[in-house]
Amino acid sequence: MEPFSKLVGTAAPLDMINIDTDIIIPKQFLKTVKRTGLGVSAFYNLRYDENGKENPDFVLNKPEYRSAQILITGENFGCGSSREHAPWAILDMGIRCIISSSYADIFYNNSFKNGILPIVLPQEQVDQLMQEAKDHPEVMLEVDLEKQTVKRGNKFSFSFEIDPFRKRCLLNGLDDIGLTLEKDAKIGTFEQKRADDKPWL
């Protein structure tokens, strides 16, 4: 998993509440078990029309937001079914950070495990960032995980809370496999001792 320390990039304002996982990645794209290749289908029913052509009115199709790495969105993001394909799709389309006032628990946890930083801010601050992103898309947003701040030039600087363990995992690029491999020496010692003590196993 790619480490996350500081991100400076375009923020896209997806001004909707209750965006569920079926909106993020519809069920017909859940056949794959690979984490890559889903980005083109993320937000499929919002991004494309019935003929598969891009919807020019959808925010992530607009030229100024196509390369967005930060998504500012409404409350209760990621609700619905517990599909890990949702953060896979968001990450595969290039988004590394989401800013909202609240998330569904399973999506929130899955985001950290896949290298996405889901920031929780008070609704008033989310609204300010949303409006600024709409009015001035050319201004970059800075997300600093080490300092736990979100900054927009000299205009806004907001602090956010994060669990220390999750923060360490993101800073060091540690997913569940990476965390296990941190104990590789101890696992090796245990396996050798077990082989010596119980060679019949």
Image (cartoon, rainbow, N blue to C red):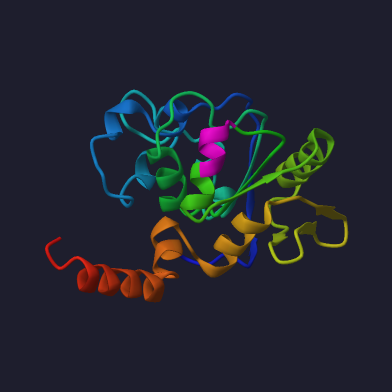
x%, y% of residue 139?
A: 73, 58
x%, y% of residue 148?
A: 75, 59
Q: Quadrant of residue 176?
A: bottom left
User: Per the image, is 177 magenta?
Assistant: no
**Can you say which quadrant of the picture contains the N terminus?**
bottom left
The answer to whether 78 appears left or right of 119 in the picture is left
The answer to whether 128 appears left or right of 37 in the picture is right
x%, y% of residue 129?
A: 77, 44
The residue segment tinted magenta is: 104-109
Which residue appears at 38% of the width and 76% of the height? 185
- Main SS class of the magenta portion in the image: helix
Q: 112 or 21, which lies in front?
A: 112
In this figure, what is the number of numbered marks?
Answer: 0
Q: 111 or 179, which lies in front?
A: 179
x%, y% of residue 58?
A: 53, 34
Q: Looking at the image, can residue 57 be seen?
A: no
